[in-house]
Amino acid sequence: MAAVPGKVNKPMKKSVDYIAKKRRSIVTFSFVICLIAVAAVGGYYQIMKRQKMQSEVKTPTTELEKLIAKDLDIGYPETPTEVMKLWGRLNQCIYNTNVTDEEFDQLLKQLRKMYSTDLLEQNPEDQHRENFKAEVEQFKDDKKKIVSYTADVGTAVKYKTINNRDCAYLRISYFMNTGGRSYAKTFQDFVLVRQNDRWKVLGFKDGQQQAASRQEATGSEE
């Protein structure tokens, strides 16, 4: 029997609805696939960018680079002796190495991280930088060089409680080449105070310079 004019055959209507739904499903599926692809490409780009940045970061190799890169907020020395050893490393690098103004400032900041609050207040950074830089330049003009240094260890470190503050007393000794085959020894006496569970430099005093042998300075025979 022929279909009645002006009416939609029910099976035909169902077929049209099915095709429309199918098309919408395909469009939705394609859209989702596109989103996933865009996200995947974006994620891959970010990973490659991060890997490239990491590969471009230079690993510190020289003593200067290692000292500047050292994170003292995380890896601060645990004992007074270890504080003094780092102090000696920083000073040896500052006095012996030809550094740029920027590198000098970075090393000075590392040194000041070992200062107690009291000592920082007594030595404003700008004035400290000016005085220290002049001292280092004079040291180099005099053709001097720090060959080695030692810090008190064990029972040589004395502990006292002063005004309810834990303090440590110890000495760091420097051996220097003062030109040619001449060597000298000088020392600094330190007072460290325990501040926020870290040993910080409260104060220090320079000792007199005295003659030393090459063997004392280098640990080797003439």
Image (cartoon, rainbow, N blue to C red):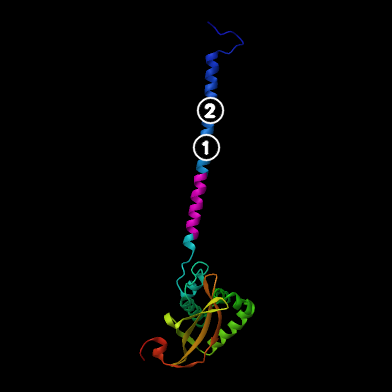
Which amino acid type is shown beneath numbered disc 1? Answer: Val
Q: Alpha carbon of mark 2 to alpha carbon of mark 1: how far?
A: 14 Å
- Residue 32 is labelled as 1
Residue 23 tag number: 2
Q: Residue at x 55, y 14 (%)?
A: 10
Q: Secondary structure at mark 2?
A: helix
Query: 24 above or below 217?
Result: above
Q: Position of residue 9 (x, y in %)?
A: 55, 12
**Dominant SS type (magenta):** helix
Which one is in front, 99 or 30?
Answer: 99
Query: Does 52 appear above or below 139?
Result: above
- Are dots 2 and 1 in contact, CB under 8 Å? no
Residue type at numbered disc 2: Arg
| Residue density around tag 1, few if under 14, some if 14–19, many if 20 or more, within 10 Å | few
The answer to whether residue 69 is seen in the rendering is yes
Q: Is residue 151 visible?
A: no
Highlighted magenta segment, given as a residue range = 39-53
In this orientation, which residue lies closer to the viewer: 186 or 1? 186
Q: Is residue 81 above or below residue 4?
A: below
Assess whether residue 48 is covered by the magenta stretch.
yes
